[in-house]
């Protein structure tokens, strides 16, 4: 059930300190744009449909934010106060609570949002702000209090005196306001400051000067409400979220052998009793089933891995790995492959766009592309499906329990029948019938005394 609170997300800025051609909120953490992470947290907390203020690369930010939001365009980047003022025009008749969350704060969690919202309700304040204490407050607005501890104002660093800059309590990117009072406070803003902008934190001084209660919600750890403004901060935020996700999976019964070297994206599903070994990256909409083991040194992208399957020292993309199958070491399963139960693929084998039947074995420097291979087939070392003639790709079909010897080229389109054999070293250009032996190579000729006649050695 949606709470009586309308959230405004500020996502119009460019983020120049990122030194990127991409808007700051479009940078990804664990496979998800920052703005999407923020929107998901708001949804998880039950605050309903937010109003998102966009500006720089507005269309891309809208696409990343999804359809569960209302968007307001800030054409002129005139500050956070100006952005909230634009969003407030959508709330003319609204008299409840307004929350404001900066769009570059991916470390805010739903529990924090709810705790602060509930404190705002209990405290009866006109405004509640998120604050924290940090050792090096450089770059953040300082929270100034009187001798009794009452919040007086927030001073931006560029406007702060040397004494004010020594204050370690700083403002985070999260606020809750009484909607009616917020509109009056926004009207009081001006651009007489070092930034030359309408700055949202400056409404704190107006509330205080009017004798209204401003409450501070102290947050720990500080990183929970800190914005991502630089590449270094993006890396730190990624590490924090990565560890949070892994902690949740371990609590759900997944074994993570080394948290420090394991990456599991937001959209991944891990079942209980799966084991993830070091130096493993699981991305996209991947599912790892019960009893499966992934890694070490594995990358799995948009792939389903069945029960008790194993992927190690390999890359698997956009495919399906059946129950009990083994991929690795040093294999590449490319998109569109269906590796069925009990299949074994390893030792520098590559499979692309192929269906591999149950119990089939493919090892030792093979390339299997655009093939349909049956059950219980043996693919010898160095086998290649020659699937491309420079213009068109063709399929190779191999029937159940066929045996393909080493160093065979299967020139597609071609079929090998059930229980057929293909002799090692053959280049097959015509179909091999069921239970037949296909041989396509020159007969061996031994020339006696050739070395002596040539005077070699």
Image (cartoon, rainbow, N blue to C red):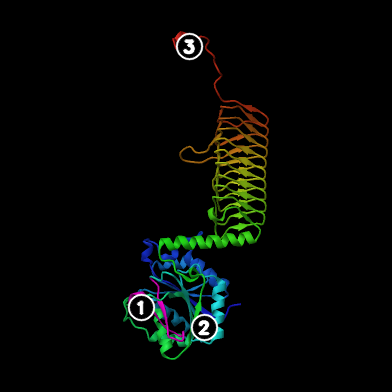
Mark nearest the camera among 1 and 2 is 1
In the rendered image, residue 40, in percent from the top left (x then y), is placed at 54, 69
Q: Nearer the viewer, residue 199 or 44?
A: 199
Q: Are marks 2 and 3 in contact (CB under 8 Å)?
A: no
Judge left or right: residue 207 versus residue 414. Answer: left
Is residue 143 located in the magenta-colored stretch of the structure? yes
Range of residues picked out in magenta: 139-163
Q: Nearer the viewer, residue 165 or 375?
A: 165
Q: Mark 3 to mark 1: distance in Å?
A: 95 Å
Q: Give the residue at the far bottom of this rendering.
A: 211
Mark 3 or mark 1, earlier in chain: 1
Is residue 113 located in the magenta-colored stretch of the structure? no
Tell me the quarter of the image containing the N terminus: bottom right
Quadrant position of residue 455: top left
Q: Tag 3's secondary structure?
A: helix
Residue 24 got which mark?
Answer: none
In the rendered image, residue 176, in percent from the top left (x then y), is placed at 49, 80
Mark nearest the camera among 3 and 1 is 1
Residue 451 got which mark?
Answer: 3
**Residue 66 appearing in the image:** no
**Residue depicted at 58% across the width and 58% down the height:** 268
Q: Which residue is mark 1?
A: 163
Disc 1 residue crowd, few under 14, some 14–19, many 20+, Cα 10 Å: few
Tell me the quarter of the image containing the C terminus: top left
Residue 97 got which mark?
Answer: 2
Q: Are marks 3 and 1 in contact (CB under 8 Å)?
A: no
Q: Tag 1's secondary structure?
A: helix
Q: Mark 2 to mark 3: distance in Å?
A: 96 Å
């Amino acid at each position: 059930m949606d709470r009586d609170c309308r959230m405004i997300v500020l996502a119009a800025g460019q983020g120049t300190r990122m030194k990127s051609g991409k808007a700051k909120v479009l940078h990804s953490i664990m496979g998800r744009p920052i703005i999407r992470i923020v929107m998901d947290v708001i949804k998880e907390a039950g605050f309903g449909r937010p109003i998102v203020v966009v500006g720089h690369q507005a269309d891309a930010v809208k696409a990343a934010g999804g359809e569960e939001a209302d968007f307001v365009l800030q054409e002129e980047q005139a500050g956070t106060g100006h952005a909230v003022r634009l969003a407030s025009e959508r709330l003319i008749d609204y008299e409840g609570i307004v929350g404001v969350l900066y769009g570059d704060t991916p470390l805010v969690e739903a529990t924090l949002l709810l705790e602060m919202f509930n404190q705002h309700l209990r405290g009866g304040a006109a405004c509640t702000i998120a604050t924290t204490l940090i050792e090096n407050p450089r770059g953040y607005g300082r929270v100034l209090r009187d001798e009794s501890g009452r919040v007086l104002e927030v001073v931006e660093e560029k406007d702060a005196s040397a004494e004010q800059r020594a204050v370690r309590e700083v403002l985070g990117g999260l606020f809750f306001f009484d909607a009616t009072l917020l509109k009056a406070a926004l009207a009081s803003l001006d651009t007489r400051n070092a930034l030359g902008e309408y700055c949202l934190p400056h409404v704190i001084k107006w509330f205080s000067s009017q004798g209204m209660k401003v409450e501070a919600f102290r947050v720990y750890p500080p990183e929970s409400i800190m914005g991502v403004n630089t590449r270094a901060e993006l890396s730190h935020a990624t590490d924090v979220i990565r560890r949070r996700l892994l902690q949740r999976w371990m609590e759900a019964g997944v074994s993570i052998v080394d948290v420090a070297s394991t990456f599991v994206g937001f959209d991944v599903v891990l079942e209980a009793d799966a084991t993830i070994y070091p130096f493993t990256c699981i991305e996209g909409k991947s599912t790892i089933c019960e009893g499966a083991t992934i890694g070490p040194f594995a990358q799995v992208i948009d792939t389903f891995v069945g029960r008790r399957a194993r992927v190690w020292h390999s890359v698997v993309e956009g495919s399906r790995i059946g129950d009990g199958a083994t991929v690795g070491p040093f294999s590449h399963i490319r998109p569109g492959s269906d590796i069925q139960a009990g299949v074994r693929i390893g030792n520098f084998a590559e499979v692309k766009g192929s269906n591999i039947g149950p119990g089939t074995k493919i090892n030792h420097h093979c390339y299997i592309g655009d093939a349909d291979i049956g059950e219980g087939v043996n693919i010898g070392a160095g086998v290649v499906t020659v699937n491309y003639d420079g213009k068109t790709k063709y399929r190779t079909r191999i029937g159940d329990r066929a045996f393909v010897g080493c160093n065979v080229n299967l020139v597609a389109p071609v079929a090998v029948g059930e229980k057929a054999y293909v002799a090692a070293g053959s280049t097959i250009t015509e179909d091999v019938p069921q239970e037949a032996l296909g041989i396509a190579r020159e007969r061996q000729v031994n020339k006696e005394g050739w070395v002596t006649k040539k005077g070699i050695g």
